Amino acid sequence: QVQLVESGGGLVQAGGSLRLSCAASGRTFSTYGVGWFRQAPGKERVFVAAINWSGGTTNYYADSVKGRFTISRDNAKNTVYLQMNSLKPEDTAVYYCAANDFGGASYRSGMYAYWGQGTQVTVSS
């Protein structure tokens, strides 16, 4: 089992950047696939980005963040990152990281068994 803790959220102006971190406990984290999801007020949780266990080229991004967000991982540090550039007010949401133990990258929230508590990102116009 793995426990996830997100950090790095905050308030930023439109056009700015933030880097979110998802720190995991557990010796086998390097074998887990990880996804980032977000939930805006009054809306459903939606997919943002995902990375497979090796951090290879099979990463996925929502169309709304392609070219602006980058997901990466450092398995030595048991951490997955979400670099967010050119932020827009519509990126405002609580961001969650999630992990699966089959190691793949998936856009489907149901494929993830482990979830963090979330970190708030607010982008002002």
Image: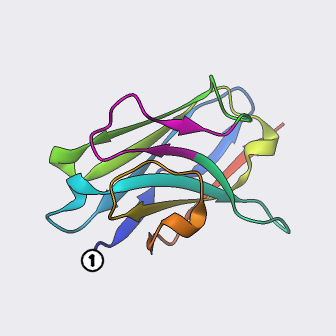
Compared with 80, 115 (above or below) is below
Q: Is residue 96 magenta?
A: no
In the rendered image, residue 44, in percent from the top left (x then y), is placed at 78, 66
- Please state which of residues 57 and 85 is positioned toward the viewer in this rendering: 57
Q: Residue at x 36, y 47 (%)?
A: 80
Residue 3: x and y, percent?
33, 73
Q: Which quarter of the figure is the C terminus placed in?
A: top right
Please name the amino acid that badge 1 sits on.
Gln
Above or below, comparing residue 113 to residue 102 in the picture: below
In the image, is residue 109 above or below residue 35? below
Q: Position of residue 60 (x, y in %)?
A: 54, 38
Residue interval drawn in magenta: 49-62
Quadrant of the frame with the N terminus: bottom left
Q: In the figure, is residue 97 to the left or right of 122?
A: left
Q: Which residue is mark 1?
A: 1
Q: Is residue 51 magenta?
A: yes
